[in-house]
Image (cartoon, rainbow, N blue to C red):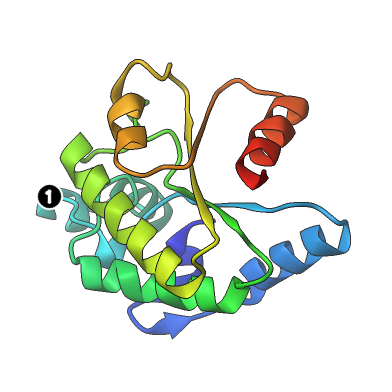
Amino acid sequence: TSWGLIESKSGAFDWAGADHTVEHNLAKKRTILYTINSVPTWAAAAPASLLNSSMKPLGKSYQAGRYPVRDLKDWENFLRKLAIRYKGKVKYWEILNEVDSGYFRGSPADYLKMLKSAWRTLKSVDPDCKVVLSSGYSIDGKAKEIMRRGCNGFIQKPFNMNQLATTISDLII
């Protein structure tokens, strides 16, 4: 889920879409791996040239969402509200998607700050939750450093549902 779909403006939350997705999957007895896949434009450390461009709002939002968060307090506030809302419903969290594939416009250090902050915030609400890194690359690249910093699991894309289920099952045990 894009953070901006839930909090399109600072402090303005709309949980309808996320609630529907979580409840739908729980009704189907599915284990949820919740991916937070982008940063909203208002919270992104995107360059001013992008933020002030004449690009259409959807394109601007997509491009800005690829940058790291400007203020970790905004990030932590969102994650805390998300974790409280879905505690007991979501146990597995992916912090951004394929950060090592070129989608993420920050540095590995930027991502590690966000990951560490997310891990600490999510664990403060639910000490039993797990943080998973999903990558389009091998464990030998940037993913290895990210895993060393506190991710609980890794699965390389492309993967099928059986591989995903096995990886999540291994985390549970």
Instruction: State left or right for residue 17 relative to residue 55.
Output: right
Residue visible at 77% across and 27% down in the picture: 162
In the rendered image, the residue lying farthest to the bottom is 11
Q: Amino acid at mark 1?
A: Ser
Q: Is residue 136 above or below residue 4?
A: above
**55 or 34, nearer to the observer:** 34
Is residue 61 visible from the viewing direction of this image?
A: yes
**In the depicted structure, whether residue 149 falls above or below residue 128:** above
Dot 1 surroundings within 10 Å: few (below 14), some, or many (20 or more)? few
Q: Residue at x 35, y 15 (%)?
A: 140
Q: How many marks?
A: 1
* Image x and y of residue 108, in percent: 21, 36
Rendered location of residue 39, percent (x, y): 35, 57
* Residue at the limit of the structure toward the left, as seen here: 48
Q: Is residue 145 above or below residue 22?
A: above
Helix, strand or loop at label 1? It is helix
Tell me where residue 29 appears, x and y as whole percent. 86, 56
Q: Residue visible at 12% across and 50% down? A: 49
Q: Quadrant of residue 41?
A: bottom left
What residue do we see at 27% from left, 67% from top? 42
> Is residue 40 in view from this perspective?
no
Residue identified by numbered label 1: 49
Q: Quadrant of the C terminus?
A: top right
| Horizontal relation, residue 71 to residue 156: left or right | left
Which quadrant would the N terminus be assigned to in this image? Answer: bottom right
Which quadrant of the figure has residue 88?
bottom right
Residue at the right extreme of this rendering: 28
Q: Residue 169: x, y in percent?
A: 70, 39
Q: Is residue 112 left or right of residue 7?
A: left
